[in-house]
Every structure is written in C-alpha cells, then in structure tokens.
Image (cartoon, rainbow, N blue to C red):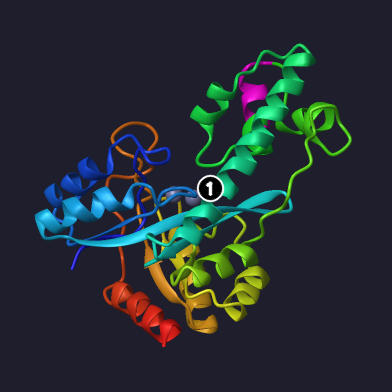
C-alpha cells in the first residue's frame, strides 16, 4: 500500500487546491493520502469529496506550529474531527493571534524605517509567521547582516519590534489534537525533536513520530526509529509536499511510509475514542 502522510494545499501554503492534490496523488499511484495543512482543516471537505470520487483513502489531518525556546516544533494531527465547530474555532484563534502579532511586528519595523511587508513574510513562511521568518526576511533584504543581528537589533524581548505573544506549546498541541478526536504525531523531528521532549510528549499522549522525511539522513531515521521503539510510538513518514515548484522538498509519494503505519494510527484513534 502506498501512502503519503504529510501534504499541504492552497488552504495553507501549498500551491495545489485540495482537489488537484488528490488527483495528483491518484496519478502517482497513492492509495492513502493525508492532507495536513498548517493550522487549518479548511481544505479537508474538498479533498474528501475528490478522494471518494477517485476511490482513494483520505486521512483528514492538520499540522500545528508550536513554540519552543529557539525553535519551532510541528505537531501533526491525523483523523481529527474536522467538522467539529469547537476545533474550528480553536484553529481560527490560533491563526488570528499569529497574524495579529506578525502584523504588529511589521508595523513597528515600518516605523523604524524598515519597509518590510506582511505579504513578503507570508510568502516566505512555512506556515505561521513567527520571529524567525521576520529575521530571515530582514537578512534577505539586507537590513541586517545576520539572523542574530535581526534579533539583537529588532526582535529580541525588549527590542523595538518585539511583540509579546501567547506561547503555544507542543504539549498544548498534543492535547488539542486529542481533544479533536485525533492522533498526534511529532513532525520532522530534526526540528526541535530532542529526546527528552519526545519522551515527555509520549507521556502526554503523543502517538507517533515522523521518522521518514525528505531532510532526514539515514542516521536520523535510525535514531527516530529507535525512539519510536523506546517510547512506544508509531513510526510514520511523509513528503511535506507543497505542490509543484521550489516549495516542495520532495515529490508527492516519494517518501517511505512503513506498512501498517496508517492502521496503527487508526487503531490508536479507536482506542482513544473507546
Ligand atoms: Zn512542518
Ligand atoms: Zn508540513
């Protein structure tokens, strides 16, 4: 069975509509496709509809961006109840809060004579716009010489473009996915996936870890498979496909997904729902 468990559509920062993505999945011979847009389930209805038409299994999903010191952790949620009104409201609050903060950072930078626009930032961000994206944009546009200088001059706490925000932690993301009846999985653990953090999240209900991912070298995969074994997690995989073009790290369906991963995730959901 061929599957891809990590993809994005135009509902977040992908370039294919949900319908187009499902068609491409079908064309490359996938039997199972998970749609996991950043902080939204708005693309799921259309994807489900097209998948039913084409006889493909669609796993409804989401990818939540969370904040950890100095980095970001992404938590995938599979089989979430995407029709749930309370989950929809929760996601909307998450998006609104981030956008408002990005907006305020841009406003302050503009006042300081740095003519960055929100559009530029949104284009560069993989998902929610945070300080790292602003820092990279400042470097790219030549306003500062380095990522570090962007923080020390503008973005660090106490600097003029710093905007306070509410932290959304990986623990909270795991809880949110569980509350929505879904199965939480640690995405691309090269980012923020320290052993202790994975262990802690496993105790809080994390079900899987995305061991197979385009950026993972063989030794990374081995390490994550070992953690999966140790902490009782399902090893998953996905391409993080964002549509044709430079936004994608790898072609759709090109990343290994262990056989049985989808069944194991489904079983975890059934157990959780009693
Ligand atoms: Zn991600
Ligand atoms: Zn992603």
Is residue 33 on the magenta stretch? no
Task: State yes or no: residue 137 in magenta.
Answer: yes
Q: Main secondary structure of the magenta part?
A: helix
Viewer-proximal residue among 2 and 84: 84
Magenta residues (range): 135-142
Residue beneath the point at 11% across and 60% down:
55
> In the image, what residue occupies the spot 45% across and 63% down?
77
**Which residue is depicted at the point 41% across and 49% down?**
37
Residue 83 in view here: yes
Query: In the rendered image, which residue does mark 1 sit on?
Result: 92
Q: Position of residue 2 (x, y in %)?
A: 20, 63
Above or below 60: residue 134: above
- Would you place residue 127 above or below residue 200 in this image? above
- Percent of width and height locating residue 58: 25, 60
Q: Position of residue 251 (x, y in %)?
A: 28, 45
Side (left or right) of 272 relative to 3: right
Placement of the C terminus among the 4 image quadrants? bottom left
């Amino acid at each position: 069975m061929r599957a891809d468990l990590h993809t994005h559509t135009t509902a977040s920062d992908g370039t294919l509509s949900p319908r187009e993505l499902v068609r491409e999945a079908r064309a490359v011979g996938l039997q199972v496709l998970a749609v996991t847009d950043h902080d939204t389930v708005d693309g799921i209805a259309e994807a489900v509809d097209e998948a039913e038409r084409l006889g493909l299994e669609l796993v409804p999903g989401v990818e939540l961006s969370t904040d950890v010191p100095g980095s970001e952790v992404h938590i995938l949620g599979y089989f979430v109840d995407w029709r749930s009104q309370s989950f929809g409201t929760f996601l909307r609050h998450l998006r609104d809060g981030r956008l408002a903060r990005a907006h305020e950072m841009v406003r302050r930078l503009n006042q300081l004579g740095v003519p960055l626009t929100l559009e530029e930032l949104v284009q560069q961000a993989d998902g929610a716009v945070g300080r790292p994206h602003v820092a990279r944009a400042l470097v790219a546009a030549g306003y500062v010489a380095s990522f570090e200088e962007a923080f020390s001059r503008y973005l660090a706490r106490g600097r003029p473009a710093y905007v306070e925000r509410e932290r959304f932690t990986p623990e909270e993301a795991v809880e949110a996915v569980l509350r929505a009846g879904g199965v939480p999985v640690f995405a691309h653990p090269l980012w923020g996936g320290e052993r202790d953090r994975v262990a802690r999240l496993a105790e809080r209900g994390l079900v899987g870890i995305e061991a197979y991912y385009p950026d993972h070298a063989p030794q990374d995969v081995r390490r994550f498979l070992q953690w999966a074994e140790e902490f009782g997690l399902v090893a998953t995989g996905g391409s993080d496909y964002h549509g044709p073009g430079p936004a994608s790290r790898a072609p759709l369906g090109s990343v290994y997904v262990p056989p049985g991963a989808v069944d194991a995730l489904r079983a975890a959901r059934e157990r959780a729902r009693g």
